[in-house]
Image: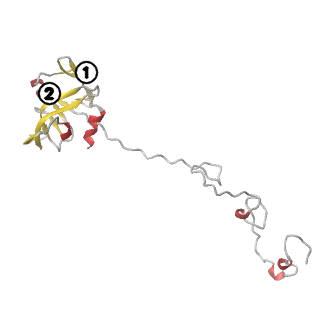
Amino acid sequence: HCGKPGHSTVECWTMHPEKKPTGRRKAKCFGCNKVGHLKKNCPEIVHSNTPLNNNTDPFSAYPLPMRRKPQHQTCRRQNPIVDSGCTLHLINNRRRFTSTPNANSTQIEQADGTTLKATHKGNATLTHRTGETLALEDTLLVPSLSRNLISVQSLNEKGYNVNFAPNCAAITKGGQRWELIREGGAWVFPEAQGGAALMAQ
């Protein structure tokens, strides 16, 4: 035996030169920088089975980029337009009606010359963002309508006043008042959030 520590007589290169590697580098640990073993077997490193933190890389001093939470799309509120050119109230959702509307097949001509089909007629209600409800009598149900329309003419016939000014507008009757808001180039009836959500159903 060669007398050197760290190996047995069976593994001694002096006694067994054929076992000595030729042209090969010894394995080097990148943990302790010593030769003879790999980092995964290093006796000087404490290995843990604890799951890695989701936001950091244990082999780097730099944190991994945080994942963005998915952005949930929200339905755009579609407030009814108060239309001075519409002769009847037009609603696209049957749930707005206070009672079962009567079947009424009517063709409605739009300003661009196209037509829409009304299927029923009845009384509907809209809820203002203040909580006040507005009753719409003789309203047509038009399922294919993209946006509800409140007829100024129909309101006037039922005793309502609709006043438009450059910077404000409102529907009034008796002591009640429903303020309108401007959206683009139109005055609209600002519904309560629950009512406007019906547009998405």
Residue 192 position within the rendered picture, expressed as x and y whole percent measured from the top left: 28, 31
| In this rendering, position of residue 81 left or right of residue 69 | left
Task: Determine the residue positioned at 77% across, 58% down.
Answer: 44
| In this rendering, position of residue 128 left or right of residue 106 | right
| In this rendering, position of residue 117 left or right of residue 176 | left
Task: Determine the residue positioned at 19% across, 27% down.
Answer: 134
Q: Nearer the viewer, residue 93 or 49?
A: 49
Q: Which amino acid does label 2 sit on?
A: Val
Q: What residue type is labelled 1?
A: Cys
Residue 38 vs 17, above or below: the answer is above
Task: Determine the residue positioned at 21% across, 19% down.
Answer: 176
Is disc 1 placed on a helix, strand or loop? loop
> Can residue 111 be seen at all in this image of the molecule?
no
* Residue beneath disc 1: 168
Q: Which of 77 and 101 is in front in this view?
A: 101
- Image quadrant occupied by the N terminus: bottom right
Classify 10 Å Cα crowding around label 2: few (below 14), some (14-19), many (20 and above): many
Mark 2 vs 1: CB contact within 8 A: no
Give the quarter of the image for residue 104. top left
> Can residue 158 be seen at all in this image of the molecule?
yes
- Extreme front residue here? 99
* Residue beneath disc 2: 152
Classify 10 Å Cα crowding around label 1: few (below 14), some (14-19), many (20 and above): few
Residue 43 position within the rendered picture, expressed as x and y whole percent measured from the top left: 76, 61
Is disc 2 placed on a helix, strand or loop? helix
Q: Nearer the viewer, residue 89 or 48?
A: 48
Residue 139 position within the rendered picture, expressed as x and y whole percent measured from the top left: 12, 34
